[in-house]
Image (cartoon, coloured by chain):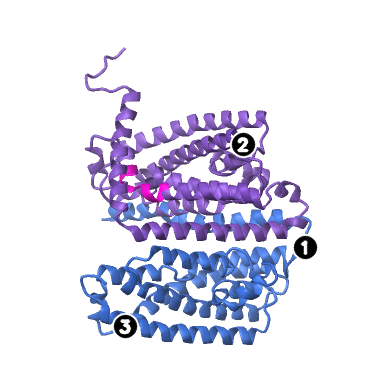
Chain colours: A blue, B purple
Amino acid sequence: MFLLSLKEFRTYTADFVGRLLYFPVEFGFFYLLFSVVYSGQTFIAGFSFNMIILYSFTSVILMDVLPFRMALEVEDDVVDGDLIYWLSKPVDYQPFVFSYHFAKFLFKLSLGLLTYVIAASLFLADFSMFRLGLFTASALLSFVFVCLFCYIIGLLAFWVGRNYWLRNLLSVAILILGGGLIPLSWFPKGVDTILQILPFQFTVYLPASIASGATVYSLATTFFVMAVWIATLFILSIWLWKRGKDKFESAGG
Amino acid sequence: MAAKEPFEESWFRNILRNLKIYLTMQKMRVLVQSEKKLMIIGTVVNMVITFAVYAGFWIVVLSQAANSSLFGSLGKWGLGETIVLLSFAEMAFALDNLTFYGLYSLDSYTTEYGLEYELVKPIDPIFSIMGKESEPLEGVVGLSLSFLMFVGAVMAYHLNVGVINFLSGAFALILGNILMGMVTISLSSASLFVGKLESLNSLLSAFYTEFIRAPLDVFPSLFRIFCYVFPLIFVATIPAMLALGMLSCEQTLLTFVAEALLIVFWNRVSYVSWKRALKRYTPTGG
């Protein structure tokens, strides 16, 4: 039994090491790229070199901890008909899915925050507990926003079936429109204004900007707009769920 | 000298027979996939949007890097050149879909299920898995679209691209694809020694999605050397540079010699690692 258990652990060791390597590889790309872009320049669109490195660092963390997989899981439940299993349980589907991902998110975020504190103390001159608290709050709101967005995309499977392209569209939108690759303030004037009206900025740009020490205009207004978007998406998700459930057949949506 | 077994094939005949079965499998995959019209539309939409996103990313990065003291090296990658690079990267993805894409899940066959089914077939297991898991239709659609993007960039930015230049770029692209295929086989074979390697495949895909879209020749020299040995630079950067005529005759020759040597090296590594891995395989899982 001992040897079997050891073999089972060994089976996933390399996989675990590979997972650990993913983060430095992803972050390393941005580090190399920005070191080329920043040579001879101190500030670009409100970001110093240290700030942009911290921005990339946190955006890689956020892209990893946010529950983008939820869209696929909800879609699977709808298309494969597994939803019937969850409907027979004495718990609503939405809270169940959210709480399942929230536990995973909290665990990953705590690890992320730990690495963030180390990175921030190295790269950020005015790192404070207040900034850490603000970053945590914005990351939590970002989680709720992404959850609702992914849930809605997953629910669309009731009408369109498998929607790989829609899921991919979301991840691509978050990469560029949400500031997953570069801060929105780097975009030309006019384009950045449009991007800051769209809700995608709440996913990565807002938390990563706060974490990197960049100036975020009127934080209270930003959080208020985010809350309005969350409320709207929540209402939409309930409406879609009610409509979709009526369409659902246990042999598959 | 040991006598040949009566059923033993020559190396060349073996490859030909495997390719023939592999192509038949690909034809069947195309037939199955062509029934999913929505998927094809989705592929096109996806590709166009992904292309636009990365083009947007590089437009912004290049505009912000204009004052960089390293802009001399970054500067040769103007917007038009970068879009050509992106179209070559998309061609590489499409080529990968057509060929080695299936090998990313090789570790599932070795650790979870199914390699024994592949071993009893009259086709080499590597070819069989490639044939079963590849996405030929997405590959063909992707290749056509990325070629259109390339032509569009050349016309819109009045780039000086000759037919010979393009052909040498396309040839380098195919060699780069073969090289990465060999690297994938070598890494996936390791699953029989160390177990599940799903995350390592994610790493490879991160390399693909992030690194090959970047002009790798502008990065620090140590990293560039890594990109030559672990042949990322041959996937899109070198083919795009050849197509754009950025390399002199001597550099082109040297590049192809280096690529040939790397193919010999990685071919040996992939062959040895796969053969050794197969010896360790038991049908109950690696």
**Which residue is labeled 1 in the image?**
A42
Residue A243's mark? 3
Classify the position of the C terminus of chain A by image quarter.
bottom left
Which mark's residue is nearer the viewer, 3 or 1? 3
Visible residue check, residue B259: yes
Q: Is residue B132 magenta?
A: yes
Amino acid type, callout 1: Thr
Which mark's residue is nearer the viewer, 2 or 3? 2
Of labels 3 and 1, earlier in sequence is 1
Question: Which region is colored magenta?
Answer: B129-140
| Chain containing the residue with disc 1 | A
Residue A205's mark? none
Q: Contact, CB < 8 Å: mark 2 with mark 3?
A: no
Residue A179 x %, y %: 59, 68
Asked if marks 1 and 2 fall on the same chain, the answer is no
**Which residue is labeled 2 in the image?**
B162
Q: Residues within 10 Å of mark 2 (few under 14, many from 20)?
A: few
The answer to whether residue A139 is left or right of residue B190 is right
The answer to whether residue A189 is left or right of residue A19 is right
**Residue sitting at x 33%, y 29%:** B16
Q: Is residue A65 above or below residue A230?
A: above
